[in-house]
Image: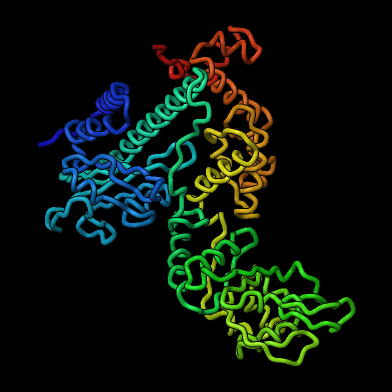
Amino acid sequence: MQSEIVSERDELELLFDIARTFDKHVELRTALGPLLSLLEVRAGLTWGMVTLLDRATGLLKVEEAYGLSAEEKKRGIYRLGEGLVGRVFESGISITVPDLSKETHFLNRAKNRAKADMVGLTYYCVPIRSGGAVIGTLSAERRILHEDVEARIAGDRAFLEKVSSIIADSAKLRERITEEQFRLHQNGGMAVDERINRDQSGGRIISGSEIIGTSNAMRTVHEMLSRVAPSDATVLITGESGTGKELIAAEIHRLSKRVGAPLIKVNCAAIPESLIESELFGHERGAFTGADKQRKGRFELAHSGTLFLDEIGELSPQVQVKLLRVLQERELERVGGTSTIKVDVRLITATNRNLEEEVKSGRFRDDLYYRLNVFPIQIPPLRERKSDIVLLADYFSEKYAAKNGKLIKRISTPAIDLLTSYSWPGNVRELENAIERAVILSKDQVIHSYDLPPSLQSAASTNTEPTTTLEAALSRMEKELIVEALKIADGNMASAARRLGITERQMGLRVHHYGINWRLYRTTKM
């Protein structure tokens, strides 16, 4: 019979041994095998498994699993939200299944086991958090035989959550070591133009796409646009301002059979009502004052290709009638003209309005709405795809670092916390503007929380209770500055104190006050 933790002291000793295991291994992956072995032998938790997010593919992959072969580990791949493991990663909430044989969401993917073997097995899966983001999961099982089931389950879950914290801390430490090695490498005059390693996919589900996001919501969008793109069906894209409706339209065109023909974009809200008809359908010479020559409209320019009409809800009733005729007959007449022109155009429209309500109020023609709403695609707001925020922030930081001739190596943990807790009423556009500002303000190749717009740092903007005081905010910034100074000084408190312009005694008091382990930042000189 396998061992179990029988006292608080046993648990503390095991946690200490687990932490010491990570100290002995340079690479995180090599420490996971011994960790899972300890869970099996010392805690009686079997089939331990650690998955980590592969940002190159947006998938969760088995990093280590106790008792599985290399081939079985290779099969352990999960999409975000898929199965119990994917659900824990997506939600960031632990899951406990009292009887694994009765759980329909358990995929049983890595090792195919019979249902009979899983009867009475209690399954645990907890998230591994690094800062404000979930980077993976830790799962294990136990066959509970004694009567005090609820206490045993609560104890196991609490213990595994502590172990996941140790894994996360180890991952953070190794990230810091990598960053310091990069800095030392640069200071040594080598690889001056070396950039931080970034995933080749950059968070894209489809190769070559400009759309960043691997959340369940965005996977649904990708699936829908992939299905409709090869057809000539009219698409209506809906969603709040700033969600990226124009990018979705461009992606549909890129994946369509019309990709070799032009994609013409029109923002209906940006063109005066008196000119929109001429812009869309063209005009003949002398059709109105100032029409000194014949002009083709956007429909003609998009012939054989795709026409994207953004903010379609802004069209006047008169233009709506003409647009309906073009959709029905695939022909038009220029303003002031009498000849009929045939057009072959695939139409994609977008709006942030509720067109159904517009139809009910009489502001939008119902027959036109039904013509446009052949294949609707709803783009989720950024607040409903939290797991994409870090991917987007990373993409925008690289984009604007290159544009401004700067090197941004990372986004600090406090900054990530702010980014992931904010509600983003302006969606992806607001996030892009925030990161561009932060890149410009950054002075040390790191985006800090204080580089982000003030709106992100207020309680009102994050929909939280106003419990943060000025003193607490200043303390948070002071701690972050001390940690950064210690990193730069390789854990030398005297050197870090000089950088911050304070005495060594003041430095020591602050390090003690904030519970900062300065030894973590020491590096061995070769």
Q: Position of residue 357 (x, y in %)?
A: 65, 78
* Residue in front for this viewpoint, 377 or 395: 395
Instruction: Judge whether 219 appears above or below 235 on screen.
Output: above
Residue 72 visible to the viewer: yes
**Image quadrant in which the N terminus is located:** top left
Q: Is residue 319 above or below residue 255?
A: below
Mark yes or no: residue 487 visible: no
Q: In the image, is 329 to the left or to the right of 291?
A: left
Residue 230: x %, y % from top left: 45, 74
Which residue is nearer to you in this view: 231 or 171? 231
Q: Residue furthest left?
A: 1
Location of residue 233 with respect to 3 vertically, above or below: below
**Residue 275 is drawn in which quadrant?**
bottom right
Q: Residue at x 59, y 34 (%)?
A: 447
Percent of width and height locating residue 405: 63, 35
Q: Quadrant of residue 307?
A: bottom right
Left or right of residue 146: residue 493: right
- Percent x, y of residue 15: 30, 27
Q: Looking at the picture, tell me which residue is in the foreground, 375 or 494.
A: 375
Above or below, comparing residue 90 to residue 217 in the picture: above
Q: Residue at x 63, y 37 (%)?
A: 439
- Residue ID at (53%, 74%): 376
